[in-house]
Image (spheres, rainbow, N blue to C red):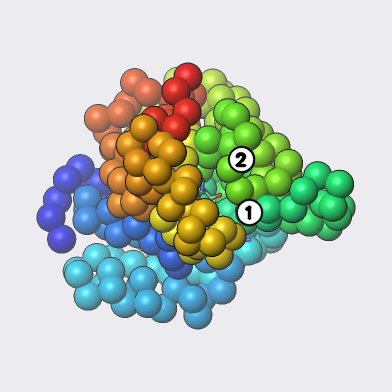
Amino acid sequence: MTTAGLEGRVALVTGAARGMGRAIATRLAHDGASVVVNDSTEEVLAEVSEELRGAGATVMAIGADVTSSQAVRAMFDAIESELGPVGVLVNNAGVLRPTRFLEISEAEWRLVLDVNLTGSFLCSQSALRQMVRGGWGRIVNMSSTAGKNISTMGGAHYTAAKAGVLGLTRAAAKEFAGQSITVNAVCPGLIDTDMVRQTISAEDADAYARSFPIPRLGRPEEVADLIAFLASDRAGYITGASYDINGGDLMI
Ligand SMILES: NC(=O)c1ccc[n+]([C@@H]2O[C@H](COP(=O)([O-])OP(=O)(O)OC[C@H]3O[C@@H](n4cnc5c(N)ncnc54)[C@H](O)[C@@H]3O)[C@@H](O)[C@H]2O)c1
């Protein structure tokens, strides 16, 4: 592992078993943080934990459903007693459903809002308590182009949840701005992960990619680079902001 500014920090990435979460955890470990990888179950984290440990990182793996306040509290207690207070939180866990408006069941609406929005709130609340005690903090919330416009693949629940994440970001940013704690959001466009591959066909993914000013899908590592910057000391004057990373698909 090289050193790049996160030495001595404890960084929690939710939904880190695969996709962008995995790339973000890898990047933060590379930058020197002790990394906590979270996903719904501990089993799915075995591969990423082993890979990061093999590269010399300090890693803790915690299976916890971010929609459960009890599980989230237990996760933060376990992190603080084993590694110390969380300094960096990346609220990355998310689910997408492509269901059309009139077909969205109440249960599916609640699931999508719970994971993407309530999960981010619950983790932020626990993290902020530790960040206030630790006197420093960085929260990066995973929104989406959907949060500013509408989703390419997801239904109304996904767009509503990702827009909610932007509101959550601004509100938390304002409350904690005087305490060396920043809260920002990133809004990726179409990034090449299982979420995309399991939702649309390869042909549709290619067709979308060709329509972007930069005519390809984004890579998880490119999003991880942006998040690593926002998680660093260098980004101390940025808070309440949201960063687009979408190959020019949405320019506002
Ligand atoms: N891929 C894209 O094009 C894209 C674009 C914009 C935003 N996003 C967002 O970025 C984030 C990561 O997306 P991805 O493409 O890597 O998705 P992904 O489906 O590959 O990974 C998401 C991870 O979150 C985990 N997860 C789901 N529910 C959870 C829960 N209740 N508790 C803990 N973990 C849970 C999953 O098990 C999975 O490992 C998501 O928030 C997604 O909405 C993705």
Q: Residue 113 in the image: x percent, y percent?
A: 72, 47
Sequence order check, earlier mark of 2 and 1: 1
Q: Could you tell me the amino acid type at mark 1?
A: Leu
Q: Residue 175 in the image: x percent, y percent?
A: 56, 23
* Label 1: few (<14), some (14–19) or many (≥20) C-alpha neighbours in 10 Å: many
Residue at left offset 43%, top offset 38%:
211
- State the SS at label 2: loop
Name the quarter where the N terminus is drawn.
bottom left
Residue 195 appears in the figure: no
* Label 2: few (<14), some (14–19) or many (≥20) C-alpha neighbours in 10 Å: many
Q: Nearer the viewer, mark 2 or mark 1?
A: 2
Residue 157 placement, left or right of 239? right
Residue at left offset 33%, top offset 37%:
214
Residue at left offset 22%, top offset 56%:
30
Residue 8 placement, left or right of 194? left
- The span from disc 2 to disc 1 (Cα, nearest Å) is 10 Å
Q: Could you tell me the amino acid type at mark 2?
A: Ser
Q: Tell me whether circle 2 and circle 1 mark residues in contact (CB < 8 Å).
A: yes
Position of 209 relative to 21 (above/below): above
Residue at left offset 34%, top offset 57%:
23
Q: Residue 204 in the image: x percent, y percent?
A: 52, 54
Q: Nearer the viewer, residue 83 or 214?
A: 214
The mark total stands at 2
Residue 215 is drawn in which quadrant?
Answer: top left
Residue tagged 2? 151
Residue 18 appears in the figure: yes
Position of 29 relative to 143 (above/below): below
Residue 233: image tag: none
Residue tagged 1? 96
Pointer 1 residue Cβ closer than 8 Å to ligand 1: yes
Q: Residue 186 in the image: x percent, y percent?
A: 45, 36
Residue positioned most to the left: 2
